[in-house]
Amino acid sequence: MNLISALAAALTLCGRHRTLIAAASIFIGLAVPPLAAAFRPHLGEAIVVMLTLAFLRVDPVELRRHWTQPGLIAAAMVWAMLILPAVLGMVFLASNSIKRCPVYISCSCCKCLH
Amino acid sequence: MLVLQMSALGLMSSPALAALLGLDVALTLATLIAATAVTPFTASLFTHVFLGTALASPLEFGLRLFLIIAGCNLSAALIRLIAGRRFIEAQREAIDGLSVIAMSMLAIAAMDGAMDHFRADPILVIKLTALAFLLALASITVTAIVISWSPGTETSA
């Protein structure tokens, strides 16, 4: 029981210092390449865990409320799914980054989905 | 890969990032679900326009995204049912802690090979990093302006 309490306390501490931990992770990944290589095959699992926790954290009533007033969601969709990709695509084409882009800045969800 | 990055939905991890930054997680999750429905079509469209080649079957891609979202939702519902709503509310910080550990794994893994690329062509890496920061800051600023003018914004305040 003590072990579970200690684990819960450690997780709570991580939760309190979440921004610091997230920022430090980038530098840990750069400083310890073997760790980055070891974690890479588990990107999909990490995303599934994060998404499940997000569903768990959100009140379902609150989530449904957003669907009854979809104006903001629709605006965000058009902006994020159509306008931004079109503009960014043109910027990348203009800077010739599309053909030269190395894999390391690739998006994690694409990596695990393809 | 850049084309996939910009045309894929705004990251499966965006609700976790919203939680990390203290933003509206419910709105982010609702937008993510809506975006999932259109991603197979927009991703195909943009890869076709910018790369001249279409993405793998939109149907297969869409099905995979749907399964991820539905599976995570179902898992969360089961956990909520077993643990109880009150327990989940009480453990909110611990849930954030678990979430940040998963996000750290993702961030560390994303750096795989970065140093090798830097050693091979430091100027290109610096230029691309600057471009990524510039685009991110510009898109965040413009998005904030656009969304603040959009209908229904006051509901999320």
Image: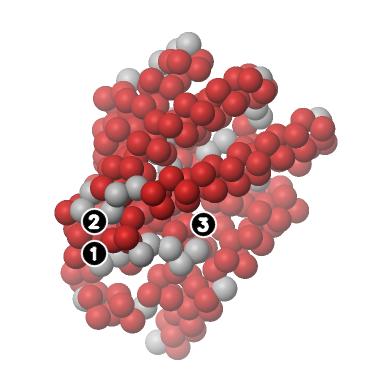
- Front one among B65 and A36: B65
At horizontal 62% and vertical 67% (from top left) the residue drawn is: A20
Q: Nearer the viewer, residue B80 or A69?
A: A69
Q: Toward the viewer: B123 or B67? A: B123
The answer to whether mark 1 and mark 3 are in CB contact below 8 A is no
> Which amino acid type is shown beneath numbered disc 1?
Glu
Q: Residue at x 19, y 58 (%)?
A: A64
The residue beneath circle 3 is: B103
From the top left corner, tell me how far across and down residue A49 is, in percent: 40, 56
Helix, strand or loop for disc 1: helix
Residue under pointer 1 = A62
Left or right of B130: which side holds A54? left
Distance (Cα) linking label 1 and label 3: 24 Å
Q: Are marks 2 and 1 in contact (CB under 8 Å)?
A: yes
Residue denoted by label 2 = A66
Q: Is residue B74 visible?
A: no
- The answer to whether A19 appears left or right of B71 in the picture is right
